[in-house]
Image (cartoon, grey):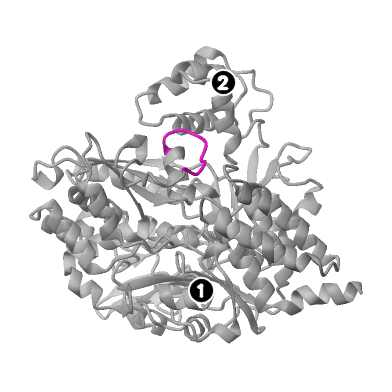
Amino acid sequence: MKIFVPLDSAAKALGADDVADAIAREARARGLDLHLVRNGTRGMVWLEPLVEIDTPQGRIGYGNVTPDQVPDLLDGRLNSLGRVEDIDWFARQTRLTFARCGVIDPLDLDDYAANGGLVGLRRALTMTKAQIVQEVIDSGLRGRGGAGFPTGIKWKTVSEAEAPQKYIVCNADEGDSGTFADRMIIEGDPFQLIEGMAIAGLGVGATRGYVYLRSEYPDAIAILTRAVSIARQRGLLGPDVLGSGRAFEMEVRTGAGAYVCGEETSLLNSLEGKRGTVRAKPPLPALQGFLGQPTVVNNVISLTTIPVIFERGAAHYADFGLGRSRGTVTLQIAGNVKRGGLFETAFGLTLGQVVNEIGGGTASGRPVKAVQVGGPLGAYMPVEKFHTPMGYEEFDQNGGLIGHAGLVVFDDSVDMLRMARFAMEFCAVESCGKCTPCRIGAVRGVETIDRIAQGDPAAIPLLTDLCETMKDGSLCALGGFTPFPVMSALTNFPDDFATYREAAE
Amino acid sequence: MHVNAPAPTEEEIRSVVTPLASLEGPLLPMLHALQDVYGYVPQECVPVLADVLNLGRAEIHGVISFYHDFRAHPTGRHVLKICRAEACQSMGANALAESTLQKLGIGWHDTTANGAVTVEPVYCLGMCACAPAAMVDGRVVGRVDDARMDRILAEVGA
């Protein structure tokens, strides 16, 4: 009997380990021949722990399983959700990057290869550097970390640079609230990241890579570290990648709790062992990155999408999407939402469809008031903007940004002045201190919002002016984008700012 | 755990950090290694690291103090981190944190009088679809309500 219980940390946070223990215990007591696989998550966090039993009809799912339900589960008396692939929430997706996540044993390289893994890398090994870079350009892939910069163009710059050593750095400092795609794919399909980094290394002529993984993700660190050592033993990494005679080696590095290190230049400083302050650009990291050498800095989802592009071809990937947003977007539906989780789909669904149809509205059952899209630096979108399609340019036109595609839903009990204050407070705590608009501006921002809260109407134009300064004058997106949540709260939810004023008058 | 431990000697500190000296950018891995051993980064490490890496002491201090992770003091026997980020706030994290700190009679970063637990804020554990979240000594817990928090506090002996 083959049973799958996810090892994903969200599943574990909801009791998956206890369920796995109970299954092993019960199977032993019954003398069952049990093959327990700890898979990644399918992304349906609202159903976790989601246990699957392998049957001739396919993998049958059981949602929100508790340890005391295990006897019934093994007796076949527990209500099932049917085949996991047929669950509507799952069936509606286009799983390209997350195709294997939740399906395979994350640390079984043979299972990985049997499910399409390494096909992309083997193909890349037959291509020239220029052909590899062109393939990425043709796919239309844009950096999934938030900025949306074309990945192929970045690779081209590094590829054409002359240097004794080049680097691939994976940005796995996923600090944005509402995002967990990086964590999920690292825990559920780590070899895909390793394969993507190896292809990047071939494309730009880099022989060393680093994954900068945040310390808040201990499970992901453990799994990826194991995967790297397996990949090394099996010849996927090392001086002779898959017997090609070409070298690629990589290492996992742990962050230290600084949000700003998700910014690429600050990440590079941190990786070098310095304070994680932001560097002025130029020089671009593509030319002078880690230790001053040409460096590709890509997000986890960008790099894990690379093997898919090389396996299926650039055209196949580019066929999905909307306008200049090609391929799929890994939506992370989070916060106060009934059916939260990771939903991979082609760009183009509207915000309202995502929140109401897929997410099922709020978990509390109260009306939705705001959705913060793109993390702590993203705008609060009101229900009136639910027609906005999920696309980089489309969001930009509606005063928002997609960022890493995390959505945090809030019900009508949220106080938007308090959220605006939190955005400034967070910026003040996390500012690296290098540029004045961010370091001082965020502190003044908190004070100014407190003045608004105390009923000082003169503080509103002051806040607007301050936000302009931060937006135009900050070195990086932390100071530059903090005005997004603040100003969107102020303009879309003026009542929350007015109530205080009127109350004071 | 480490409250009453004697201050580490230079020799001990060197034995922890020198195996990492050949890494590219070794300082963060060294600081993590020291914190793994001692539970915090003792002040005695600063001159040793400065010597090993040929950097100024101020430089080392600057790095240690930049990052939230590195502590200057020992913690209680357990560390409880409560997420304060937006997704958790949307599910009542502020009230949860307030009531937890009140129950324990401490503030953020403080340790309970019996030395059982230190409470720290954290900004996002990636549990945004099962908020609010907390982490106890590296183990994540999702959908934390008052009852679940009480169980956690009982487990750590707070």
Residue B39 falls in image quadrant: top right
* Residue at screen point 70% across, 40% down: B116
Q: Nearer the viewer, residue A336 or A495?
A: A495
**Residue indicated by mark 2:** B57
Q: Quadrant of the N terminus of chain A?
A: bottom left
**Residue that label 1 marks:** A340
**Dot 2 falls on which chain?**
B
Image spot of residue A423 (x, y percent): 65, 60
In the image, which residues are magenta?
Answer: A271-279
Q: How far from the left and from the top, in percent, is residue B134?
A: 61, 55
> On screen, B114 above or below A151?
above
Q: Alpha carbon of mark 1 to alpha carbon of mark 2: how far?
A: 47 Å
Does residue B158 appear anywhere in the picture? Answer: yes
Q: Residue at x 36, y 45 (%)?
A: A285
Instruction: Give the number of the mark in front: 1 or 2.
Output: 2
Is B153 within the magenta?
no
Task: Please name the amino acid that badge 2 sits on.
Answer: Arg
Q: Does A207 sit left or right of B31 as displayed?
A: left
Query: Are callouts 1 and 2 both on one chain?
Result: no
Total numbered circles: 2
Q: Secondary structure at mark 2?
A: helix
Q: Are marks 1 and 2 in contact (CB under 8 Å)?
A: no
Q: Quadrant of residue A88?
A: bottom left
